[in-house]
Amino acid sequence: LGADGIYYPNLVSTDEEPHYGKYGMIRKTYLKEHRSAMYSLYMLEDRLTEHLNTVDDEAQERMDILVRQMMEKQGVTEELKARDQMVWVGAVNNIRNAAEEIVLKELVYI
């Protein structure tokens, strides 16, 4: 509350360092283009960097877990890599693409 009786936003920065990567940047673009009210709220409350860091960390962790689980389930092992490298590369690429679709749908585009 200011001296003139008007409420002003508290624009003090929390100074959290942005360390977000790919998924944080995708989330930021999504918020700007499709959830502008939520984006503005995060900006006004100075929580955008914290939110993007959190989303990126969670997405990276979820990607690692999903890729590992899918590789085990589909039998993509180091033995396959040694036996037929091209088949292994194709399988890992398919797994990564599928896992990324899941992560984007569950954590980024919500």
Image: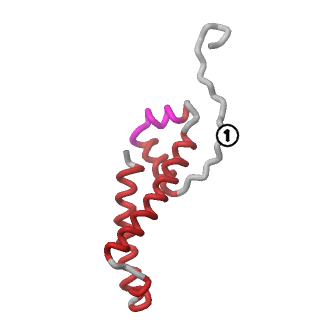
Magenta stretch, overall SS: helix
Above/below status of 70 relative to 105: below
- Indicate yes or no whether the magenta region holds residue 39: yes
Above/below status of 72 relative to 61: below
Asked whether 86 or 25 is in front, the reply is: 86
Identify the residue at the far bottom of this view: 83
- The amino acid type found where label 1 is placed reads Asp
Q: On the rendered structure, is 102 left or right of 49?
A: left
Q: On the rendered structure, is 3 left or right of 94?
A: right
Residue at point 35%, 69% (across, down): 70
Looking at the figure, which quarter contains the N terminus? top right
Residue on which disc 1 sits: 15
Residue 98 in which image quadrant: bottom left
- Residue 20: where, in percent of width, then height? 56, 52
Residue 7 in which image quadrant: top right
Looking at the figure, which quarter contains the C terminus? top left
SS at circle 1: loop
Residue at point 48%, 53% (across, down): 58
Residue at point 40%, 91% (across, down): 83
- Residue 89: where, in percent of width, then height? 41, 80
Q: On the rendered structure, is 49 left or right of 105?
A: right
- Residue 16: where, in percent of width, then height? 64, 43
- Residue 96: where, in percent of width, then height? 40, 68
Q: On the rendered structure, is 107 left or right of 44?
A: left
Residue at point 41%, 50% (across, down): 107
- Indicate yes or no whether the magenta region holds residue 56: no
Q: Residues within 10 Å of mark 1 (few under 14, many from 20)?
A: few
Identify the residue at the far top of this view: 4
Start-end of magenta stretch: 34-42
